[in-house]
Image (cartoon, helix red, strand yellow):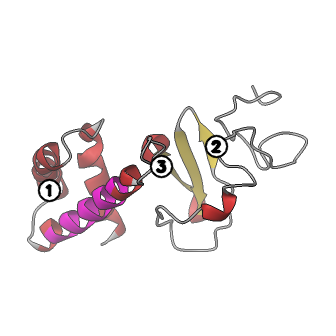
Amino acid sequence: MLLNPPENDWLMWRRTYDAWGYSPLKQINTDNVKNLTVAWTWAMTSGATETTPLVHDGVLFLYNWLDKVQALGALHVLPDHSDVGDGSLVATERAFIVDLQSRALELKRQGKSADEAGQILLAEFKTKFADWPNLTAVPNVVKHVYAENQ
């Protein structure tokens, strides 16, 4: 697998043993690269960290300071390539993350436990983001938000 990684995977620094750092994916090319913008950001552990994200089977792995590894589901970290190309997926992704983090912190300030907040937000998000796949991860994300904001 490391000698010939799947196109969607980035399994090591510079992606392959030849160290070219080249992706065989065709969505981004010399004509449209100038249109790229930041779609989302992710907070890493505070400290001296300079890392290469690794991707395997749709999961983005980030090595952090003090040997902490974060695993992010990369399923939704893609621009909208609908016929309209209106960027609605990116906007929805951003709204989801911002809303989840801010609501979790609000519930924490109200004295709710991480478990209580996770269940409350799971119910809220099932209505607010009804088409979102895998909302069952919401309680775990809430626990991470609580842990990062102690």
Amino acid type of the residue tagged 3 in the rendering:
Val
Q: Which label lies toward us, 1 or 2?
A: 2
Q: Secondary structure at mark 3?
A: loop
Of the image marks 1 and 2, the number of the one nearer the N terminus: 2
x and y, in percent, of residue 44 in the image: 51, 65
Q: Which residues are magenta?
A: 92-106
x and y, in percent, of residue 76 in the image: 43, 45
The circle on residue 117 is 1
Q: What is the magenta segment's predominant secondary structure?
A: helix
Q: Secondary structure at mark 1?
A: helix
> Which residue was labeled with disc 2?
27
The circle on residue 77 is 3
What separation in Å lies between label 2 and label 3 (alpha carbons)? 14 Å
Of the image marks 1 and 3, the number of the one nearer the N terminus: 3
x and y, in percent, of residue 21 in the image: 81, 49
Q: Which label lies toward us, 2 or 3?
A: 2
* Image position of 26 (left or right of 137): right
x and y, in percent, of residue 52 in the image: 69, 55
